[in-house]
Amino acid sequence: MTGIEDKYTAITFSPVQEFIEKSRKLRDLYGSSFILSYLSRAVCDKAKLEQHCVISPAMPNLTQGTPNLIVIQGFFSRNIAEQTFNEVWQQLVNQCRCWIEKELPQFQQDYHENWKRCWQQWANHAWEFFWATGATSNDARNNLMSVKQSRNWTAINWTGESSSLSGTDAIVWHGMGRIIKEQERSFKRDEEEIEAFYAALKQKLEGTVDKIEAADINIKQEQLSIPEMVKRLLTYDQVADNLQIPKEERPLYEVPKGFADLNRYDRNYWTGWFKGDGDRMGSYVRSLTDEQCKRFSEAMMEWSKTLKSELPESQQAKKVDREGRIVYAGGDDFFGVLYRKPKQSKSQEEFELLNAAECVNWLQKFPHIWQQHGQVWQNTGKLITASAGFVWAAPKVPQRDVLQHCNEAESNAKKMGRDRIALRVLFNSGTYLEWVCPWRFLPVLQDYYDPQDGKQDWIHFYNDVAVLAARHAFRGNQTEVAVGLLRVYFEQSVRSVENEFWNEQDRTEFYGLFNDNQPLNFNQSAWWNTYNGNDPYDPKGQPISTGILGDRRQYVRDKDLDLRKVHQSVNNWIINLAKVGFHLCGNSNT
């Protein structure tokens, strides 16, 4: 039980991931990130006004990137916290509704009580609020997790057509909630009115949105629900100006004024999306004292704030220009996109494109970027790693599909034992290729060497794998064919290719797995994740190093290794290396 005698309070709200995922465009992603951060900040600010110390997240004055798990020293009343949260969300919703009513007066006669009632339902029932207390900060967190198991959610019903994005919520338009007899309803007339509403909205926003983006909007596709509309509108200054956020505190680099340079339906170039977070952060934070937790949260917020400055720099620009954007960075969570702006020229077809190989080069540096805020946890003697998914996305893939693939890639990196990255190539058809690799072995991508022509285009390795796979050469309880290919195209590189990204010990370990004319030795540590827990493969223990195949226990049957399963995983790892390497590091069309 929790009570007023407890000394710590933990707060969170839901849904978070679903709220972000239901985003049609990059602008909506920025809007959803802003809203989550704004709501968290409001609760933190109220706690400070009540003379409480906010342990996590530290520095709540940052509007963008504030995590939604809040830990407060002292008993912070649920009524006050929840009321603050609800009032701020209702303010956002009402701000958008009033702006529409003011700016689109031609539909005034239809802004009736049902219209307002629909907005009010979302203002009252969009979120679940969770609150718990405890004698210690860890007790408060654990109690909060228990509270989250009991849901108290209210579903919202509606009349009419549903959003073209979610398919489960009503479309925002002046006639929403209109109640008429079924025999008098004309869906064709409703559709025409909906299109007229969105056309008027588009025209009103054209003054603040890039012309290219505005011209590209498909009215029939832009049929948003109320929460989707709120996310969209709040990215425009003319709507957000009444939120009472000082201009100097608005992270303008996080909510750009324009998105035309990254319009997925207008530009014919690939983009690289990365998403990840720290590994086992909950377990780590629970091991800290309050002071350590506060310092750690502070360091993570500082790191996320400066992550944008770590994006790759343009080599063509006369001034420093970062090749990408950070969509959000809240503590240890991060999500961004890598791309290069089109070259300014008379010919619209002339672009300076960012290629996949440049993205891979930047990803090689990411473990160092991540460890830049490691001084805080070095004092506790523990190492924190990160896992991430990277998606090299074709030009016409819908934004929401790209986000889904980012989530799946990150999840696959976690499932393999963490401290690794999943590289995914996503085609317009929706098909994809994926290769999961520990960060420490990622430099192998730069080691490719073609003995036939000395080039590094990966074409021969890729073709050899395709031909041999068609002949079923990788089947059976063997790895000789796949390992033979790896030796042909990579072991030469140990002597012929300079690679600045390798740690020499990791390089020695990796190539030590594939010694010439020797069978694979699966007792070598580089195959498996190792920990210093009670069991050398205990994932609850402190991580020591990651291996190619992940957790050894996943391959054990009747106390012995299932060699058939192990061999097939090795084959798949090398096959996927060839396919993904060809598209990301070679001279393919991607």
Image: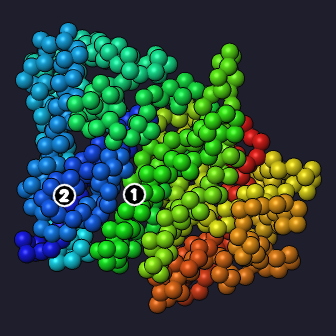
Find the distance from the CA under tag 2 to the CA under tag 1.
Answer: 18 Å
Circles 2, 1 touching at the beta carbon (< 8 Å):
no
Q: Label 2 neighbourhood size at 10 Å, few (<14), some (14-19), many (20+)?
A: some
For discs 2 and 1, the disc positioned in front in the rendered view: 2
Residue that carries the numbered disc 1 in the rendered image? 301
Res 65 seen here: yes
Query: Mark 2 is on which residue type?
Result: Lys
Q: Is mark 1 on a helix, strand or loop?
A: helix
Q: Which residue is drawn at 50% across and 51% down?
A: 307
- Which residue is at the front of the view, 124 or 180? 124
Q: Which residue is drawn at 51% across and 86% down?
A: 532
Residue ranking furthest to the top: 106
Please determine whether, in this image, residue 45 is positioned above or below residue 516: above
Q: What element carries label 2?
A: helix
| Mark before the other along the chain sequence, 2 or 1 | 2
- Which residue is at the front of the view, 49 or 420? 49
Please determine whether, in this image, residue 360 is positioned above or below residue 572: above
Q: Residue 48 carries which label?
A: 2
Query: Mark 1 is on which residue type?
Result: Met
Res 478 seen here: no
How many numbered marks appear?
Answer: 2
